[in-house]
Image (cartoon, rainbow, N blue to C red):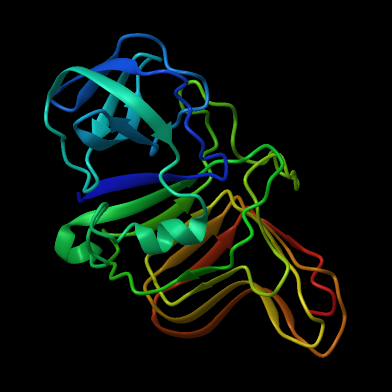
Amino acid sequence: EPVTVTYSVGLDSSNWIYQPIGIDIVDGAATFSEPWPPGLARGDRLEIEGVGSVYLGVCSSDTVCEVYDGQGGKPADVSGGLAISATRAFFSLQDAITGAADPEHLGTFDLVAADRSLEILCYGAWGESDSTPVSIDGWITSPENQVRVVVPSLPPWPMYYPRHQGRWDEMFYNLTVSTGTCVTSSVGNLVLEGLQLHCAGDPETDIHGVLFDGIDGDVRISESIIRLDGASGPGDRVGVEIRSAVGGELVVRNSILYDLGDG
């Protein structure tokens, strides 16, 4: 299977470390000299003094975690290092969609050639909404080399539950766009899971929760809440639409779509 590279998204992207914490890295496993503060989560960026950035993987406790470099490989071993910063990897989902391909991260949009899958984990900001419309474009994918955008359902160590509980709740991650469609994508082999989307705008214009145009490959939307603005007017109100596709299958399951107006 391809290597899955995970980056975090969160508006609460301030430094979680109040003072430097000792860190040793051996063969991709990091041991911290003391428990790090609650709030750190898988996909977060750790800055090590004099070394650079690594990304947080699965943690077995609040002092022992896997770490990886920007391309998903094992970083160089570190002895007696200092972790001086810990933040979300990206501020918004759109930042992650475009920034994950930059030289500091994967360095490419071609997941097939890189033998990678991209996973973006979205964490809530205690009532603050992500408000930048998302355009997923340019990524080269396959059934094995997917793009996954997920709001985790289980708490990373020792994070709180970051996914909604089956009804709209602004305390959990949500993408709220006041100017039109929330998500557009020309990329297939895409998974959207656990999202809350609230999409509003001018009643004269078309508004979609998620609009796919030109995709090639399967798309899965699950455990998500998509709400529009409830307006009735000349503009269409559509929860999920495929405008065109080369091939593939769209499945929307275990999700709620509402406030579609006359859509």
Name the outermost residue toward the right: 232
Q: Position of residue 223 (x, y in %)?
A: 60, 50
What residue lies at 28% left-to-right and 47% top-to-bottom? 4
| Residue 122 in the figure: left or right of residue 169 | left
What residue lies at 31% left-to-right and 9% top-to-bottom? 33
What residue lies at 58% left-to-right and 67% top-to-bottom? 133
| Residue 251 in the figure: left or right of residue 62 | right
Image quadrant assignment for residue 109: bottom left
Q: Nearer the viewer, residue 145 or 173?
A: 173
Q: Nearer the viewer, residue 186 or 88?
A: 88
Q: From what the image shows, is residue 88 above or below residue 201?
A: above
Q: Position of residue 202 (x, y in %)?
A: 79, 80
Q: Nearer the viewer, residue 32 or 81?
A: 81
The C terminus lies in which quarter of the figure?
A: bottom right
Q: From what the image shows, is residue 75 above or below residue 5?
A: above
What residue lies at 20% left-to-right and 49% top-to-bottom? 1
Q: Position of residue 5 (x, y in %)?
A: 29, 47
| Residue 192 in the figure: left or right of residue 3 | right
Q: Position of residue 179 (x, y in %)?
A: 70, 73
Q: Nearer the viewer, residue 56 or 152?
A: 56
Q: From what the image shows, is residue 135 above or below residue 93?
A: below
